[in-house]
Structures are given as C-alpha cells and as structure tokens.
C-alpha cells in the first residue's frame, strides 16, 4: 500500500504553528479577518436587537401599529 502525500509540506505547517504560537492574543483573534466574525457581527446583531426592542417599547407606549 502506498501512503498518501500530505496536503501541505511539513515545513510550511511548522512555520504556521510557530507564527500562531508566538502571537500573544486570544486564540479566536489570531487570524487577519477574525475580528469581523468575532467582534463586528455580534456587535451588529446586538445593536440591531436593541434598536428593535426600543422601537417596540416606543410603539407600545404610544399605541402605534395597533389593529382595531
């Protein structure tokens, strides 16, 4: 039986491991685009939900949008 070749050479893998292990950040913020998925998207969802809650409370307190 022949063994399958690895997807990336070992040397490149070791270089990437050394790079990521040398960064002193949280694990989920080590990549270049990780701030978008870990910070920006949850912040946008939180802001949207707070806006919708505030608008709903305003509409309820002023009687806007009631069905007859």
Image (spheres, rainbow, N blue to C red):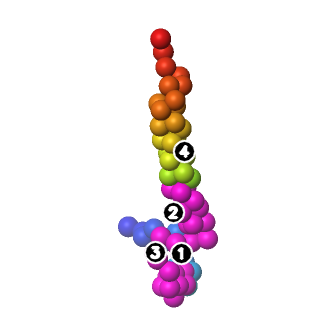
Q: Is-magenta flag for residue 33?
A: yes
Label 3 Cα crowd, 10 Å radius (few <14 / some 14-19 / many 20+): few
**Which label number is shown at residue 58?**
none
**Badges 1 and 3: C-beta atoms under 8 Å apart?**
yes
In this figure, which residue is indicated by the disc labeled 1? 30
**Which label number is shown at residue 27?**
3
**Front position in the image: 41 or 51:** 51
Magenta-tinted stretch = 16-43
Precedes in sequence: disc 4 or disc 1:
1
Secondary structure, mark 1, is loop
**Badges 1 and 2: C-beta atoms under 8 Å apart?**
no
Instruction: Name the magenta segment's main secondary structure.
Output: helix
Label 2 Cα crowd, 10 Å radius (few <14 / some 14-19 / many 20+): few
**At which x and y percent is residue 56?**
49, 35
**Front position in the image: 33 or 68:** 68
What residue do we see at 52% from left, 29% from top? Answer: 62
């Amino acid at each position: 039986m022949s063994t399958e070749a690895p997807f990336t050479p070992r040397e490149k893998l070791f270089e990437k491991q050394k790079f990521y292990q040398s960064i002193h950040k949280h694990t989920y913020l080590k990549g270049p685009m990780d701030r978008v998925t870990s910070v920006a998207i949850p912040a946008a969802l939180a802001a949207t939900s707070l806006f919708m809650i505030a608008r709903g409370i305003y509409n309820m307190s002023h009687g806007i949008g009631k069905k007859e």
